[in-house]
Amino acid sequence: MSKLKERYTLTQSQKMMVFILSMSLYGLSNMITELVPSVNLGPIEFSIEYFAFIPLTLCMLFHPLYAAVGAALGEIIFGEIMLGQFGGFGELEKFIAFSLAMFIAGTLVRDPKNKRQVAVAALTGVIIHQAISAMVDILKVWVGVEELESVPGLAESVVVIEGFAFLNDILFSGILFALLPTVYLVPRLYGKIEPLLGMKPRHNQMSYSLAEIIGPRLVVGGIFLAGAAFLFEYLSEAGFNWEWEADFVAMFGDSFIWVSILAAALLAVITIIIMLRKNTTNRENERIL
Amino acid sequence: MEYTSKFTEKLSVEQMKIELLNTAYGNGDTFLAKLDPRTLFIWYLFFGIVPWFIHNQVVLFGMFVLMVVLTVLTKVSPLIVFILCLGLLGQGGYLLIASLFFGGDGTVILPLLLLTLKLSVISLASITVFCSMDPEKLSNGLLKIGVPGQVSFSIAYGYRMLPSLLEEYHHVFLSFRLRGKAPDRHGFLYWRSIVYFCKIAVLSFYPLLLSTAKRARTTVEALETKGSFYGFNHPKVKKIKLAHLRMGTRDYLFLAFSIIYIVSVFTLGNFTS
């Protein structure tokens, strides 16, 4: 019995295979979606945001953690950095949001042959991801544009645009490019693709230690977000003072900005290090029972 | 529409493969490419983050000029610059229209321009840094700064494999088109054709998933044969592998130049405002 259980443990190489597979495929799909033009119909944008079905399918068929992290990394490397759309802070956020959403979607599925379960999981994954990213996008413009309150119409328009984008992504990308393909692909690939990687199909009664994986990541993300939000707020206030007040204050504001920048950079580095640590430890500890 | 879509599709896929290979391997002789990866990471850490917190036009513009010069020096492929411009203009213009719609006026333009400038500085920084590193160098650099070996290998592998994956995807896509039947009529606003193409684009991933899985297995087996997994996690092996990475005079000069430039831009910005 113990031998049988041993077999469902992913070896180092199998984890690597899932990781590589997910990263290169989702990277490829990102390149394609970047090239496909979007059609604007008034305020509604018909664009293929992403081929979410690829990470969703892989998360449901293989170990969700490696597939999710691989896909998120693939997106950042090939969809963002390589094409020059890297947004600094936002990307870390996106990485966490995306891998979290995909991971949750993957764990929701117990039986990949059950289409209803797959459909619910796929939609949940997309909704979680889009909700987080819409909030972050709103925050991004609020940070980037300092005089937001003084510019009439901008704040409302950002919120409305993001709201539109959120609904559009769920309805358009979510259903056409996440729900339908995933429901089509997962039952078909189940049992076919696993032998190619030299592993057994996912067992119905698998359980993941959710707390172990999400716990530290969520905590880190939360601390990071809270810290960033605080910093941004503080900073914009400092910037405001700096522009309007006297010379002495100007000097103070200037040096203060440097302090903030240093703090922000430090925070980012610490977060990255912690995340990498967590990833590696998880990779070693993680087992499919 | 049919002809243009066919034309652009062929053009973009072929073009993309070439551009990708170019991005991955074609920039070995530029100035930035000769720098140590760590220098580039440090440099990028600054230019990827700091512009978010700067609201001074002069400073941002000074940074932008530096980025443009470096982008030209790096010989970034036109396709990538084009995609970048499209994205930036699209976002900025869209926000502008929407805020005008909600009762904003001419004053909206300036903050939006500033935001676009900011975004373009950050984007150009990432383009210059990551286009001037070939996969090998990127992976070594990442390994050096402590990224796990598996991750840094996967990134290098992905860079290398993407062009051939793209080609394979294109083949599958074309064979789907060859065997399938295109819609007789385009329908209103070409929706039939669009749906047809989207469907094929998704379906093409089915064979690709299987073949990529096979490829991933082959790769990992080859890695095992070479003992890479041992190498990934043992500091001694890492040390030997990364012994060739050195910060040279060139690196320090580059960093020093950047610092001087930034400081002078900041002083100028302070002075004028």
Image (cartoon, coloured by chain):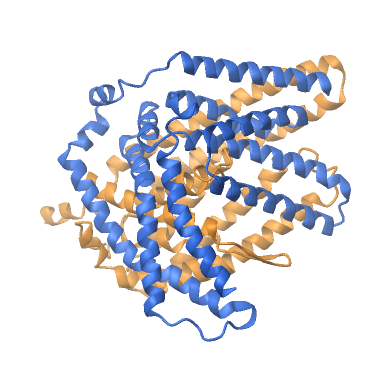
Chain colours: A orange, B blue
Across and down, in percent, residue A105 comes to 43, 60
What's the residue at 86%, 49% (across, down)? A152
What's the residue at 39%, 44% (across, down)? B159
Above or below, B23 against A10 in this view is above
**In this orientation, does residue A206 appear?**
no
Q: Pick the residue in front: B166 or A121.
A: B166
Q: Pick the residue in front: A173 or B59.
A: B59
Left or right of A84: which side holds B270? right
Q: Pick the residue in front: A132 or A2.
A: A132
Across and down, in percent, residue A282 comes to 33, 41
What's the residue at 59%, 20% (across, down)? B258
Above or below, B96 against A228 in this view is below
Left or right of B142: which side holds B187? right
What's the residue at 62%, 30% (across, down)? B69
Could you tell me which quadrant the C terminus of chain B lies in?
top right
Snapshot quadrant of residue A143: top right
Above or below, A258 against A51 in this view is above
Across and down, in percent, residue B253 comes to 53, 15
**In this orientation, does residue B171 appear?**
yes
Snapshot quadrant of residue B44: top right
Across and down, in percent, residue A90 comes to 58, 42
Snapshot quadrant of residue A145: top right
Left or right of A61: which side holds A142? right
